[in-house]
Image (cartoon, rainbow, N blue to C red):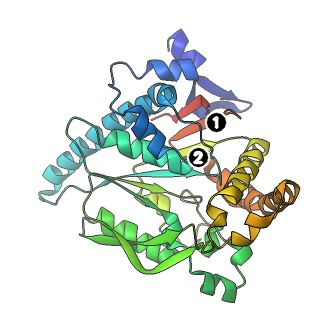
């Protein structure tokens, strides 16, 4: 192992981690000659509220991720052809599925959208679709009836069988497959509204708990998890206190924007003054989001293939890639 490779090993008290870690500069160098295919306006459009995403961040962090994924997808396609030859079958190519996980307010949506935009600009112009697991949340009426409104976003608040059926159908190459649509304005799943996924080359699935598992059965029976359908997964990471500040800042901005819409589920918060808004946002964070992070989301971090570690500036400062 050369000195550079040794410097990127992430050591633990018990030995070596399954990850190789890279500083921002080391990771940026892995872009090599991958071209920038997005304009500043396009980067602005994929950026979520309060995220800091500019051309430099795309160039130094997300272009190397795009290059890595291009290599992984090509390798998966070659392996698929080899398996078809071995089995003597002629099945249609199945989508390559990428999972994006992380806490509330960490920037998952921005990461998912910028990757979708970059991957769709590869020379062979693949079809790249994006779905969020918000659409698979149980409707508010069901959550209220089951006493789960304070657990919205926790694993038990999702229609897991429906999500698993969706992913199984996508992986099986069925067409088209429909995913429910969620409205952040009304804070609920929209009845009889769907987005169709029709055999994309790549599907990005973004959500809080997409890397979640459960207790394994002692009898050895198969229990499918959402991540079983992923070919690659990313976890967007940041410290708890940083996440809290980002959440509160976003809440304050929404109070002045989306919450002012009378149709908004959170319209009542638009009339809060600064101190009341900060107190309310902090309470929601500590009562719901922080618990979900500690109990359900953060424990799945080490299941990801790639971990992007953000600092308070919203910029990624360290990248950890799982070894093969």
Vertical comparison of 153 with 123: above or below:
below
Query: Which residue is situated farthest in the bottom direction here?
Result: 145
Residue beneath disc 1? 314
Name the residue: 74% across, 30% down.
13
Q: Nearer the viewer, residue 42 or 98?
A: 42
Position of residue 310 measured from the top left corner of the image (x, y, whole percent):
64, 35
Horizontal and vertical percent position of residue 46: 46, 45
Total marks placed:
2
Task: Say which quadrant the C terminus sits in.
Answer: top left
Q: Residue at x 68, y 41 (%)?
A: 238
Q: Is residue 132 above or below residue 101?
A: below
Local crowd size for mark 1, using a 10 Å CA cut-off: few (<14), some (14–19), many (≥20):
some
Q: Where is 154 relative to 241, above or below?
A: below
Task: Tell me whether circle 1 and circle 2 mark residues in contact (CB < 8 Å).
Answer: yes
Residue 109 placement, left or right of 140: left
| The image quarter in which residue 242 lies | top right
Residue 8 in sight in this render? yes
Closer to the camera in the image, 36 or 206: 36
Please name whichever residue, 39 or 24, is drawn nearer the observer in this view of the structure. Answer: 39
Residue located farthest toward the top when viewing the structure as drawn: 3
Q: Earlier in the sequence, mark 1 or mark 2?
A: 2
Question: What residue does disc 2 label?
Answer: 107
Q: Position of residue 292 (x, y in %)?
A: 71, 61
């Amino acid at each position: 192992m050369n000195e550079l490779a040794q410097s990127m090993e992430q050591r633990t008290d018990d030995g070596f981690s399954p990850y190789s870690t890279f500083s921002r500069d080391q990771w940026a160098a892995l872009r090599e000659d991958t071209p920038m295919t997005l304009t500043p306006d396009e980067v602005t459009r994929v950026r979520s509220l309060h995220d800091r995403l500019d051309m430099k961040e795309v160039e130094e962090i997300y272009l190397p991720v795009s290059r890595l994924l291009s290599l992984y997808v090509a390798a998966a396609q070659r392996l698929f052809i080899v398996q078809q030859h071995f089995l003597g079958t002629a099945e249609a190519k199945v989508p390559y599925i990428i999972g994006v996980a992380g806490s509330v307010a960490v920037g998952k949506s921005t990461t998912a959208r910028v990757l979708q935009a970059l991957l769709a600009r590869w020379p062979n112009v693949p079809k790249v679709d994006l779905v969020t697991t918000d659409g698979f949340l149980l409707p508010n009426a069901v959550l209220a009836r089951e006493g789960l409104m304070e657990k919205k976003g926790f694993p038990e608040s999702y229609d897991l069988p429906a999500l698993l059926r969706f992913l199984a159908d996508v992986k099986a190459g069925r067409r088209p497959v429909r995913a429910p649509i969620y409205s952040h304005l009304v804070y609920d799943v929209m009845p009889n509204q769907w987005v169709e996924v029709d055999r994309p080359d790549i599907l990005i699935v973004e959500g809080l708990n997409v890397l979640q598992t459960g207790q394994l059965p002692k009898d050895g029976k198969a229990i499918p998890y959402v991540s079983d359908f992923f070919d690659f997964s990313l976890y967007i990471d940041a410290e708890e206190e940083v996440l809290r500040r980002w959440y509160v800042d976003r809440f304050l901005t929404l109070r002045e924007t989306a919450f002012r819409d009378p149709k908004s589920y959170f319209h009542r918060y638009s009339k809060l003054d600064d101190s009341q808004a900060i107190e309310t946002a902090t309470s929601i964070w500590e009562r719901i989001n922080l618990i979900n992070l500690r109990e359900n989301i953060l424990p799945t971090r080490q299941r990801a293939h790639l971990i992007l570690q953000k600092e308070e500036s919203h910029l990624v400062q360290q990248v950890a890639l799982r070894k093969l």
